[in-house]
Image (cartoon, rainbow, N blue to C red):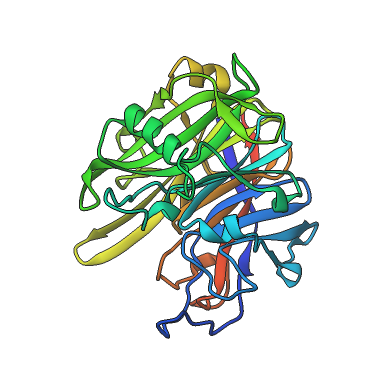
Amino acid sequence: MTRASILQQGTIHCFPAGLRDAKGELVNAEVSAVAFDGERLLMASDKPIPGEERSACFALPMTDAGPDDSKLAYYTQPLIKQAVKYEDFALSADGRHVLATTGFDRLDADSNALNDYNHLLIWPLGKPDDVQVVDPDPRDGVEGSLELRGKLNGAIGFPYYKIEGLAAIPGERGDGLLLFGVREQGQAHDDFEYVSRVIGAHYQITANGNLEFLDEMREFYAFDPDSVDGVRFECGLSSLEYDPYHARLYLLTSFENEVDGEEYIGGYLWQMSLEDFRARRAPELVTNPEGQPLEFEHKAEGLAVLDHDRLFVAYDNDRNLELGSVDERDERHACEAPYTILEISASPAS
């Protein structure tokens, strides 16, 4: 049995308090992607953060005392600023490159107006100036990973979908297997079901530092979290994370439900060995120290392995400002993103 205990909780100031967008509306921190490069937390909001000197993607040191947002730095490279609706980060299987995906949840068939929502980016660790678009459209001047979108279309099999997970694991070919987590699929953005599917393809890093796929994109895994005892609400996959210390894969699922007019948000954490993943066995639901299912009180959207025993969880509560147990205050400022640091341990089966 895998158990998680809370080591630390808090909030990260992602931009100045009171920041407003071009319409005069208060900007809200909605962190949906996180990775850890050994020194820094890389984070991204799935909503733009306005300002020439800012972007939705940023980094901050991870110290012994926790995240240090006094040294937060934005990634303002044009390609990184251009992509919209970041959903997950991953390190390449060898840990030398950063990968960032958007949601791929919208495209205008008659124009390039929504191409910014369709990006997979790659850059060498610590060198965001060298960012490149993966699998771009071959036509000059057409932005976005549109070749990749065609491959996702074929593997997912629905006209509408949303990507929210990304992880690179060791594979049988090339430099590894790149996995995409599917959260929603259906006929349209207002006609879909929540799912927990994982599709992917083997890849290699090219001589110029880009990524190319070596085989056909296909489904590798799927499960139904709602059918597991202790899961109280309908969930969809919200993040994937490879744990190289234990050769396992973490899957994060989250929910946003309304029951009798009351909103419920939260999430669950799952883990499985790479062997079990390849055999398509059921994942294990991580529990709290008392052995009950670990249910996050916030909408868990980002997950990063910090070291052998610790995980970092980022929350995207949309416009919900309640802090719950994260802070003694009742509500966060719109510029703050709540987080939790967990310690993971294995207990012998009873």
**Coordinates of residue 6 in the picture (x, y in percent):** 62, 53
What residue sits 53% from the left and 70% below the top?
49
Residue 265 x/y as whole percent: 37, 58
How many circles with numbers are drawn on the protein? 0
Q: Is residue 123 left or right of residue 270?
A: right
In the rendered image, residue 128, in percent from the top left (x then y), is placed at 70, 52
Residue at position x 76%, y 68% in the image: 71
Residue at image point 56% right, 35% down: 167
What x and y, as percent, mark residue 198?
Answer: 43, 30
Inspect this view and state whether residue 190 appears. yes
- For residue 96, what is the image quadrant? top right
Vertical placement of residue 71 versus 167, above or below: below
Q: Quadrant of the C terminus?
A: top right
136 is higher (above) or lower (below) than 27: above
Residue 349 visible? no
Q: Which residue is drawn at the image coordinates 43% and 63% (left, top)?
A: 317
Outermost residue toward the front in this view:
140
Judge by depth and name the residue closer to the eye, 234 or 287: 234
Quadrant holding the N terminus:
top right
Residue 156 falls left or right of residue 43: left
Does 177 appear above or below 101?
above
